């Protein structure tokens, strides 16, 4: 495919904006359009559950770029007008307002939509955290709350519980795992995370699901758990995961299966790419489809997609990476940890609150986790690079 004259990026958050910026840096001089469903200029999402929610940052500080930097990009921003349909063959996108934008290349960067709790719709005091507006609405309720229940024990739930607790109210963190973030951290580090939350006053309810929201006069009053326990609450946070925002692509001709299915170069169809949380691409080092929901992948995959649009023709084979900040602890994870991998402390001492854990799988090291040891964790990353970047035999998609 020749270099396109017009690139349309559908999604104006981190992945979409980085794609546009990378295209310009790589010499793309054609027309560039970014279509976003929110009115706001592009902003970062990781601070929403921490600095913005706590009030440490004004919302404008989460903006990804200044107005001058966005102007210098020489791109057309069509904000507040969500995409509702794509004709992949014609590379034409229709928006909610009825506008149609046709380009030579389309990049799908529509991210995720938060899942809601059963019975949540229209119930006051129940929140998700996905947008700046979500974070500000939750903050407003937290400032007057005495009791908070966070439903969901993944990254977002654990971070939100930590932030809410720092704001004063009593906090329960509820989830099905043996400890918060067990699936992302492995049992060893997750156990230490559970202890960290308890030391900071968060009450954990592990191994349970939400049975029902309790309410009176249209406002939440608590939750009932699958084991029958009832927890009173002024505020409930739904942190039960997200779904790829692909509903608008139902009749597009693209393959949709837990995201937009792509080849090793993140191509979903001729002239169509997907990037960020919504993209499920063939990772050659792992020999399977992979979709990552983290800020680092949004940036790295955007660089790869921009390169492919510009003719670089290289597969995208990252070493997955994410981090989380909770209380005074930064946890970093390189690779993909699993319940089957064998965990070994290779540096530091968990008892002293600083350590590095390496996870081993059948093919060797698969992941490295660092707890308040950022420099050492980066050094240990070298032991897992081959597992992700060396193609498996017959890994051709």
Image (cartoon, rainbow, N blue to C red):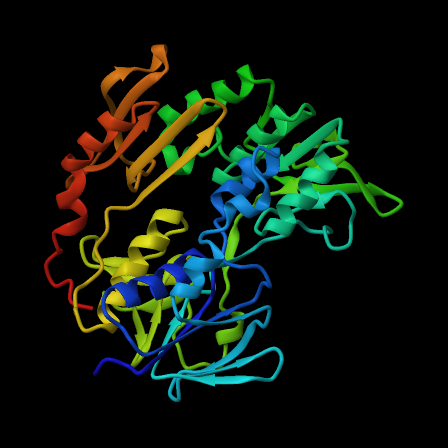
Q: Position of residue 48 (x, y in %)?
A: 55, 43
Where on the picture, by quarter, is residue 284? bottom left
Q: Quadrant of the N terminus?
A: bottom left
Q: Residue at x 47, y 54 (%)?
A: 66
- Residue under the image location 60 percent in, 68 percent down: 80
Count of numbered circles on the image: 0
352 above or below 90? above
Q: Is residue 92 left or right of residue 98?
A: left
Depth check: give the residue in front, 220 or 70: 70
Residue at the far top in the pictured view: 352
* Point 53% across, 22% down: residue: 197
In the picture as drawn, the residue positioned furthest to the right comes out as 217
Q: Quadrant of residue 371?
A: top left
Say if 108 sits above or below 174 in the image: below
Up/down of 239 relative to 203, above or below: below
**Residue 245 showing in the rendered view:** yes
Q: Quadrant of residue 168?
A: top right
């Amino acid at each position: 495919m020749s270099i396109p004259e017009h690139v349309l990026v559908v999604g104006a958050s981190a992945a979409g904006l980085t794609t546009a910026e990378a295209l310009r840096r790589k010499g793309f001089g054609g027309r560039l359009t970014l279509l976003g469903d929110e009115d706001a200029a592009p902003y970062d999402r990781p601070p929403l559950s921490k600095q913005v929610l706590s009030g440490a940052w004004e919302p404008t500080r989460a903006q990804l770029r200044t107005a001058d930097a966005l102007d210098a990009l020489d791109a057309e921003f069509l904000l507040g007008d969500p995409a509702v349909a794509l004709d992949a063959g014609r590379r034409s996108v229709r928006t909610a307002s009825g506008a149609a934008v046709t380009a030579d290349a389309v990049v799908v960067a529509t991210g995720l939509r938060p899942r809601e709790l059963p019975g949540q719709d229209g119930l006051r005091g129940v929140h998700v955290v996905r947008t700046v507006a979500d974070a500000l609405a939750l903050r407003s309720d937290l400032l007057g709350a005495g009791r908070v229940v966070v439903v969901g024990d993944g990254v977002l739930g654990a971070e939100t519980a930590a932030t809410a607790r720092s704001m004063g109210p009593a906090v329960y963190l509820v989830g099905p795992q043996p400890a918060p973030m067990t699936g992302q951290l492995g049992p060893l580090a997750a156990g230490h995370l559970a202890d960290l939350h308890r030391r900071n006053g968060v009450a954990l309810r592990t191994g349970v699901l939400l049975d029902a929201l309790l309410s009176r006069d249209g406002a939440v009053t608590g939750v009932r758990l699958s084991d029958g326990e009832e927890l009173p609450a002024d505020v409930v946070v739904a942190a039960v995961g997200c779904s790829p925002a692909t509903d608008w692509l139902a009749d597009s001709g693209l393959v949709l299966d837990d995201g937009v299915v792509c080849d090793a170069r993140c191509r979903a169809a001729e002239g169509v790419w997907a990037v960020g949380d919504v993209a499920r691409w063939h990772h050659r080092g792992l020999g399977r489809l992979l979709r990552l929901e983290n800020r680092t992948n949004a940036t790295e995959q955007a660089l790869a997609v921009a390169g492919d649009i510009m003719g670089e023709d290289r597969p995208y084979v990252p070493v997955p990476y994410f981090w989380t900040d909770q209380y005074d602890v930064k946890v970093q994870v390189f690779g993909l940890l699993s319940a089957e991998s064998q965990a070994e402390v290779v540096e530091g001492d968990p008892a002293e609150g600083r350590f590095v854990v390496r996870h081993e799988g059948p093919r060797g090291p698969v992941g490295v986790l660092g707890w308040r040891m950022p420099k050492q964790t980066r050094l240990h990353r070298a032991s897992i690079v081959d597992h992700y970047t060396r193609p498996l035999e017959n890994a051709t998609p």
